[in-house]
Image (tube, grey):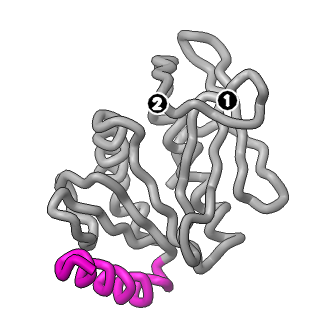
Amino acid sequence: MHLPRYSYYASESKTLFEFTSEGSKGFIKKLIEYTLVGPEVYNLGFGDMDESGETFNDMLVSNNGDSYKVLATVAATVVEFTENHPKAAVLASGSTKSRTRLYRMALNRYLCDIQQQFVIFGYCRNNYWETFIRDQEYEAFLLTRSENQQQLWLELQIVNQMIKTGE
């Protein structure tokens, strides 16, 4: 998948990335962070860098006219992150429903390309995980490299059973 994207800086651990969005509102520094939230599960968070340069705000709406280029940049960091953390599962959801919808639309648009390297699961409103289905609404997404599919799916089945039985 060769989409226009921004150049970015990666930390040595490949868990923190930064780049600058260039658009109608000017230059906006962005920060992407992968945070360990469970065994081999990392939350993907990103947004406009705050003034300290150490954290980001994922509630700001930049409207810089480059959302697909920004998302392509984030996608490139997912590839680099998982190359350095090959067993990782990346958890992503929007800070708002409209952002989650934007992410779903991007996943739908590039699904064939994404599935060459990754498998995606979606978290449904009925409180269970399933293999990502095009145009299905999800509250969150979980993706991992294709070689991890079977192991992650088995773990998600256990989670689904726990949710179902109320454990």
Left or right placement of residue 50 versus residue 134 in this view: right
- Quarter of the image holding residue 15? bottom right
* Amino acid of disc 2: Ser
Q: In this view, does 81 lie to the left or right of 156?
A: right
Estimate the x, y position of residue 82 in percent, counting from the top left.
62, 68
Percent across and percent down for residue 140 are 34, 55
Residue under the image location 31 percent in, 86 percent down = 158
Which residue lies under the disc numbered 1? Answer: 49
Residue at the farthest front position: 167
For the residues labelled 1 and 2, the Cα–Cα distance comes to 16 Å
User: In the rendered structure, does residue 160 fall within the stretch colored magenta?
Assistant: yes
Q: Give the residue drawn at x 41%, y 65%.
A: 142
Q: Main secondary structure of the magenta part?
A: helix
Q: What residue type is labelled 1?
A: Met
Are the residues tagged 1 and 2 within 8 Å (C-beta)? no
Task: Tell me where residue 102 appears, x and y as whole percent.
Answer: 33, 39
Residue at the far right in the pictured view: 12
Residue with the mark numbered 2 = 67
Mark nearest the camera among 1 and 2 is: 1
- Which residue appears at 68% of the width and 26% of the height? 50
Mark 2 secondary-structure assignment: helix
Residue drawn at (60%, 62%), measured in percent from left and top?
Answer: 79
Specify whether residue 85 is painted magenta: no
Could you classify mark 2 by the number of other residues whose Cα lies within 10 Å: few (under 14), some (14-19), or many (20 or more)?
some
Mark sitting earlier along the chain (1/2): 1
Question: Is disc 1 placed on a helix, strand or loop?
Answer: strand
Q: For the C terminus, which image quadrant?
A: bottom left
Q: What stretch is highlighted in magenta?
A: 146-167
63 to 52, vertically: above or below: above
Q: Quadrant of residue 9?
A: top right
